[in-house]
Amino acid sequence: MSGLLIRQAGDEDLEAIIRLHEEDELGSHGDAWTPENRPAYEAAFEAITHSSDNELFVAVTGDEVVGTFQLTFIPNLTGRGALRVKVESVKVKAARRSQGIGAKMMEFAEKYARTRGAAMLELSSNKTRTNAHRFYERLGFARSHEGFKKRL
Amino acid sequence: MSGLLIRQAGDEDLEAIIRLHEEDELGSHGDAWTPENRPAYEAAFEAITHSSDNELFVAVTGDEVVGTFQLTFIPNLTGRGALRVKVESVKVKAARRSQGIGAKMMEFAEKYARTRGAAMLELSSNKTRTNAHRFYERLGFARSHEGFKKRL
C-alpha cells in the first residue's frame, strides 16, 4: 500500500476510529458511534492521550482513516527490568483488508517500541480470530501464552 | 492464610520481590538478584512507581514477602471506553504455595480494579503453566484469547 501514513491520533480522528471498532463483530464489545456513547469515547480518548504510557495511532491514506492500534508501555521487573509494549485494539477497515496495512502498522509498532527501548512486544487475540493468529505468527510472534479475561 | 497483608511495594521490598522471580524457572527470563542486575531492577522499580498507570504490590506475612503482582491500568476505546486492568508478574513464594495466597492476591486485585472503575481484568499466562490456568478459571476468568510475544 503506497501513500500510507501512520501517525498519532488526534481528536478529529475519534469518530473514524470508533467506526473501525463498529465493523468488528467478533470482539462483541458493542461499540458504536452514537450520541449516548460519544462522551464515554471522548473521556477514554482523553485518558489515553494524557497517559505517558499509552499512544493511540491511526493509519491514513489521503484523508481516510484505514487502520488503528494502541501501544501501552509497561515498565516491569521481569527479564531484568525489561520494558514491554502491549499492542492493543488493532483494527483495519474491512474494505481495505489484505492490502498490507496491518503489516505496516505492526512494523511501525515494532520500530516505535525499539525506539523507546522496549525488549518485548506482546498482544492477545481472541481465540476465534484464526486469520489474525496466522498473521502474527508470520510476523515472528510466538503464540506462547493463554489469554484470560474477567469482566468486572 | 491468616495475617496476610497486601500493600504497595516499597524500595525495601525490591530484593525480596526479585527473589520470588528467581524461583520461577518456567518463565525463563533469567532473573536473579545480582550486583550486575541490581541497577536495572532499581530503574524498573522506579519507572513502575512513577507511572500513574502502574502499581506494584506485595503480599506479606509478618515481615516476610510471600507474593507479588503488578497492576497496569490501560485506558482503551474498546467497550465504550472501558478501562482495563492487566495483572502482571504474579508470583507466590514456592514454600508458601497452596495456602490461598494467590487467591487472596487476585481477590485484592479485583477489588482494587473495581475501585478504580475498571470494567475488565486480564492477564496472560505461559501455556506450560497448566496449574495456573486452572486457578484462573476457578476464579472466573475465561481463557478466551491467545497470547503472543515477540522479543525485540
Image (spheres, coloured by chain):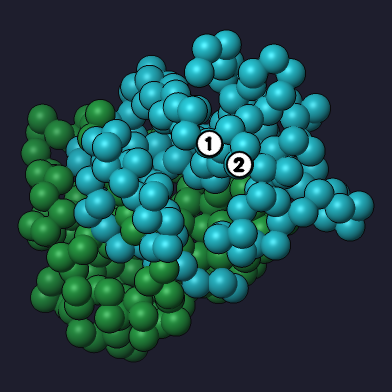
Chain colours: A cyan, B green
Kindly tell me whether residue B87 is visible in this rendering.
Answer: no
Q: Residue at x 50, y 18 (%)?
A: A1
B20 over B107 or under it: above or below = above
Q: Are marks 1 and 2 on the same chain?
A: yes
Q: Residue at x 36, y 85 (%)?
A: B138
What amino acid type is highlighted by mark number 1?
Arg
Q: Chain of mark 1?
A: A
Q: Secondary structure at mark 1?
A: loop
Q: Position of residue A52 (x, y in %)?
A: 57, 31
Q: CA distance from mark 1 to mark 2?
A: 6 Å
The quarter in which the C terminus of chain B is drawn is: top left
Does residue B34 appear to the left or right of A100 in the view shown? Answer: left
Does residue B34 appear to the left or right of B51 in the view shown? Answer: left
What amino acid type is highlighted by mark number 2?
Ala
Q: Residue furthest top?
A: A3
Does residue A98 appear to the left or right of A115 in the view shown? Answer: right
Q: Position of residue A12 (x, y in %)?
A: 80, 27
- Residue identified by numbered label 2: A94
Q: Are marks 1 and 2 in contact (CB under 8 Å)?
A: yes
Kindly tell me whether residue A33 is visible in this rendering.
Answer: yes
In the figure, residue A126 lies in which quadrant?
bottom left
Say which mark, if any, is on residue B87. none
- Residue identified by numbered label 1: A97
Q: Residue at x 20, y 41 (%)?
A: A79
